[in-house]
Image: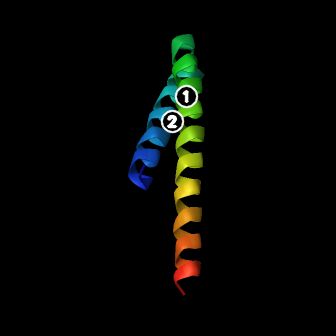
Amino acid sequence: MSKDALLKEVEMFKSEYEKFERGNKAAGTRARKSLQEIKKMAQELRTQIQETKNTAETAA
């Protein structure tokens, strides 16, 4: 999991959401799916950050 992958997913969401706002209902489904993936990726990244922080604290 990387920050770049998360940012790429956010860009995908943005694109699909803009299509949804213009009336493309199928894009709304893709935007919701993308939001769910962002949620998952953010949680994974959050866990990685916490683990790195905890490892650094125990090493010090």
Q: Which residue type does callout 1 highlight?
A: Tyr
The Cα–Cα distance between marks 2 and 1, rounded to whole angstroms, is: 5 Å
Q: In percent of the image, x 58 and y 19: which residue is there?
A: 28
User: Residue lying furthest top in this view?
Assistant: 25
Q: Which quadrant of the structure image shows residue 39?
A: top right
Residue 22 visible in this rendered orientation of the protein = no
Task: Work out whether residue 32 or residue 27 is closer to the camera in this orientation and state it.
Answer: 32
Disc 2 vs disc 1: Cβ atoms closer than 8 Å?
Answer: yes
Which residue is the site of mark 1? 17
**Local crowd at mark 2 within 10 Å, few (<14), some, or many (≥20)?**
some
Residue 3 seen in render: yes
Front residue (pair 18, 29): 29
Which x, y percent locates residue 9?
A: 45, 39
Q: Looking at the image, which residue is at 59% across and 63% down?
A: 50
Check the image and report above or below for 27 versus 5: above
Under mark 2, the amino acid is: Lys
Q: Position of residue 15 (x, y in %)?
A: 46, 32
4 to 35, vertically: above or below: below
For mark 2, what is the residue? 14
**Observer-nearest of 49 and 11:** 49
Disc 2, SS? helix
Residue at the extreme bottom = 60
Under tag 1, what secondary structure? helix
Q: Residue at x 49, y 26 (%)?
A: 16
Examine the rendered structure and indicate whether residue 44 appears above or below residue 14: below
Q: Position of residue 21 (x, y in %)?
A: 59, 23
Q: Which mark is residue 38?
A: none
